[in-house]
Image (cartoon, rainbow, N blue to C red):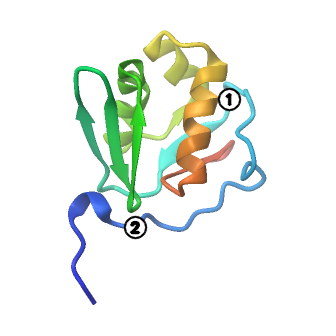
Amino acid sequence: MSPRSANQSVGRMVPSLPYIDAVPVDGGLRVRLTTARAVLDVGDDTVTLSAAGSTFEFAPAAEAVLRPLVDGRTVDLAALADAAGLVLEDVAGLVQELVAGQAATVGSLL
């Protein structure tokens, strides 16, 4: 078994049923990362999240969405949108990328 770096740790396999194909634009849905070892790197032009063995690149505005998740919090989509000053649709799209990459899970009871 080869060692993995902290940011390459595979997350817990937590299905986001029934939201595998698309995260709905629902402010009450809650999201959390599937790994406690995510790393957020903030550059001038991009924000990079390394989690669950994958790397995700986003625009700088995504930092306000990603920071509470990397800090280990479970947060509802509306709170993330408010904190980031983004529309709920954009936050749901960002979270969908994380769910597709198995780096996050969503649900109403998280």
Residue plotted at (66% across, 46% down):
109
In the picture, measured across the screen, residue 3 lies left or right of residue 13, that is left
Mark 1 neighbour density, 10 Å: few (under 14) some (14–19) many (20 or more) = some
In the picture, measured across the screen, residue 55 lies left or right of residue 82, that is left
Name the spot of residue 42 as percent of width and height, x first: 24, 29
Nearer-the-camera pick, 34 or 44: 44
Query: Is 61 placed above or below 65 here?
Result: above
Q: Secondary structure at mark 1?
A: loop
Residue plotted at (56% across, 38% down):
95
Mark 2 neighbour density, 10 Å: few (under 14) some (14–19) many (20 or more) = some
Name the spot of residue 57 as percent of width and height, x first: 40, 37
Which mark is on residue 28? 1
Kindly identify which residue carries mark 2. 10
- Identified by mark 1, the residue type is Gly
In the picture, measured across the screen, residue 77 lies left or right of residue 58, that is right
Mark earlier in primary sequence (2, 1): 2
Give the number of the mark in front: 2 or 1. 2
Q: CA distance from mark 2 to mark 1?
A: 27 Å
| Quarter that holds the N terminus | bottom left
- Identified by mark 2, the residue type is Val
Nearer-the-camera pick, 26 or 21: 21
The image quarter in which residue 11 lies: bottom left
In the picture, measured across the screen, residue 79 lies left or right of residue 73, that is right
